[in-house]
Amino acid sequence: MTDKEIVNDVLSMVNSSLTGYANVISQSENQQLRQTLQQIRNSDEQFQFQLAQMATQKGFYKPAGQASQQEINQVKTQLTQG
């Protein structure tokens, strides 16, 4: 397995766990558990961001291009009307 494959696998796993945290946090009634999960999620988000930056610098990962203002406005409109 190459370094690129390992990094991309880790990014994929972290992204998946972030989705899982969001689901569990939104359903948690226990405030202490909710705060603990939010702290873990925040830490994982920071790790994911740093790993993605490193992967981008090494050419292992190419993030999506930036959206134009028109595209941003279109999404905002769709979300507020939906």
Image (cartoon, rainbow, N blue to C red):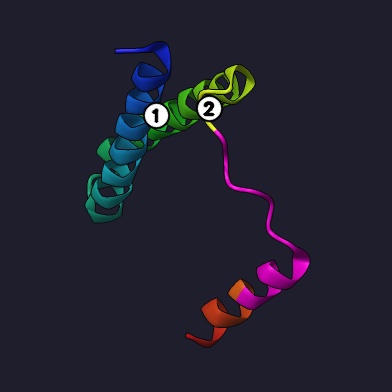
Pinpoint residue 59: horizontal percent, then vertical percent: 58, 23
Residues in magenta, as a range: 62-74
Number of numbered discs visible in the structure rendering: 2
Residue 3 versus residue 76: which sits nearer the camera? Answer: 3
Q: Circle 1 sits on which residue?
A: 11
Q: Circle 2 sits on which residue?
A: 52
Q: Residue at x 41, y 28 (%)?
A: 44
Label 1 environment density (alpha carbons within 10 Å; few <14, some 14–19, many ≥20): some
Which part of the image, by quadrant, shows the N terminus? top left
Residue 50 belongs to the span the image colors magenta: no
Amino acid on which disc 2 is placed: Ala
Q: Residue at x 54, y 87 (%)?
A: 81
Give the structural element (helix, strand or loop) at label 1.
helix
Q: Residue at x 47, y 23 (%)?
A: 47
User: In this rendering, would 80 be left or right of 11?
Assistant: right
Q: Please say if the residues under marks 2 and 1 sit with CB atoms less than 8 Å apart.
A: yes
User: In this rendering, would 63 be left or right of 3?
Assistant: right
- List the single residue furthest toward the right: 69
Amino acid on which disc 1 is placed: Leu
| Mark toward the start of the polypeptide (2 vs 1) | 1
Pinpoint residue 5: horizontal percent, then vertical percent: 36, 21
Label 2 environment density (alpha carbons within 10 Å; few <14, some 14–19, many ≥20): many
